[in-house]
Image: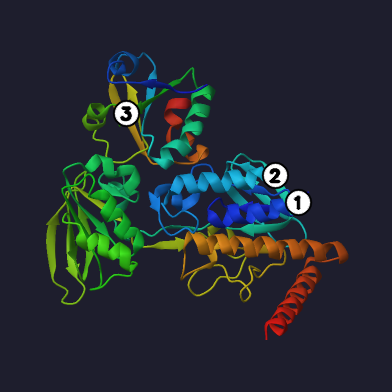
Amino acid sequence: MTARAVTEATFEQEVLNNDKAVLVDFWAEWCGPCRAVSPILDQIASEHSEKLDIVKLNVDENPNLAMKYQITAIPAFKVFEKGEVVKTVIGAKPKPALEADLAAYIH
Amino acid sequence: MRDIIIIGSGPAGFTAAIYAARAELKPLLIASSVEIGGELMNTTEVENFPGFPEAIMGPDLMGKMQAQAERFGTEVVYDDVVELELEGPVKRVELGSGEVHEAKSLIFATGSAYRKLGLPEEEVLSGHGLSWCATCDGFFFREKQIAVVGGGDSAMEEATFLTRFADKVYVIHRRDSLKASKIMQQRAFDNPKIEFIWNSEVAAIHGDGQVNGVTLRDTVTGDVRALDLDGLFVAIGNDPRTHLVHGKLDLTPEGTIAVHGRSSRTSVAGVFAAGDVIDPFYRQAVTAAGSGTVAALDAEHYLAALEDTSSPEEAESESEAAEEAAAIARFAEVN
């Protein structure tokens, strides 16, 4: 399963009003580590779809949201629960490390 | 069991793979899970790789190297090595997934990792205005005041690149002259947005949740002063990535993996090393590629000698002797 894309137009509905916890992957085409970590997020998305929704937000195309959430380094992963950021992870990491960071939301 | 496993996916790893694959050794290349392609993946234009007179983007160059390695039968695995067994005739490589691969020979080409400033606030501010990747994070510093720490080619490239976004880019350097190549220096000197702060080091980074400045210490007088900044990019060099082989392979005083002479042979028979992980001085994409070639050829000789002997040590000394004989013959020929 590939994590689906969200935009400034769909962010409220897909992320802020989501009943489940949602991980937003802030990324861009020109960011090598973002592209490298993308398949790992897809894997986590399909393995834990019942607990955690994973979506991607392109910062190049959605700069207002990147600014709102004070993104200054990518890839940045923010977990939202009931519209609030509850966890931030920055930087591309191997799958076991990312799963450890997200343990509270996938187990 | 495989003939050869290559660990690393930078210019050294992929070039070793091209040679090993063309020698029909069917190499397995462990590319890492999130750093595939190595350091060049985070650079923009590569202007000094021969054959690309118009320059080539770092990620494009690495994509081409990988395609070339795969074209001849290299198998690429996107995972990280977590454990290595190097002694004896069977080299054992354990991956993050738990998968284990075995081979008669191994090429270690893990490159180097960004050097940190060594300040306590580095960890918390990392990703919050403190960055190691200008190409990734420059975008977020539009019309901001930022600084690059370092005096080498990477620092000059980052500073020049960052002027696309930032209003002002300081270059903070410990000395009063640069290590960077003349062309990179000149480009930075000519850029009106770049200002050099000489003989200075970062003594502290300020910011509560987000970088807002640094304390600079003059390396000559010891005087300190504050500088307001929105972001700080660190490019002060790299350290060889050897944690997987500590206690297993001999290292040099510089911390790189020790190799015999101009070869790639490490202190363990059947284990070869190439690229930045053996090179404390040159550390270029081209020298890494050349070093990868050496490692593949050394491994090929070793595997051929292994066919005729019983132990890895014998194979090693035999291939070594054969190489020396060949070198002497070549020398005699040209003289």
Q: Which residue is mark 2?
A: B73
Question: In the rendering, at what x and y percent does residue B327 appear?
Answer: 71, 78
**The disc numbered 1 marks a residue on which chain?**
B
Q: Are marks 3 and 2 on the same chain?
A: no
Q: Which residue is mark 3?
A: A86
**Which circle marks residue A37 in the picture?**
none
**Numbered marks: total:** 3
Question: In the rendering, at what x and y percent does residue A49 appear?
Answer: 49, 19
Residues packed near mark 3 inside 10 Å, few (<14), some (14 to 19) or many (20 plus): few
Residues packed near mark 2 inside 10 Å, few (<14), some (14 to 19) or many (20 plus): some
Q: CA distance from mark 2 to mark 1?
A: 8 Å
**The disc numbered 3 marks a residue on which chain?**
A
Q: Type of residue at label 2?
A: Gly
Looking at the image, do the residues carrying marks 2 and 1 touch, with CB atoms under 8 Å apart?
yes
Residue B121 visible at all: no
Looking at the image, do the residues carrying marks 3 and 1 touch, with CB atoms under 8 Å apart?
no
Viewer-proximal residue, B196 or B188? Answer: B188
User: What residue lies at 49% left-to-right and 23% top-to-bottom?
Assistant: A2
Q: Is residue A1 above or below residue B148?
A: above
Q: Which residue is mark 1?
A: B24
Q: Type of residue at label 1?
A: Glu
Instruction: Find numbered disc 3 in the image and state the secondary structure of the residue it sits on.
Output: strand
Q: Quadrant of the C terminus of chain B?
A: bottom right
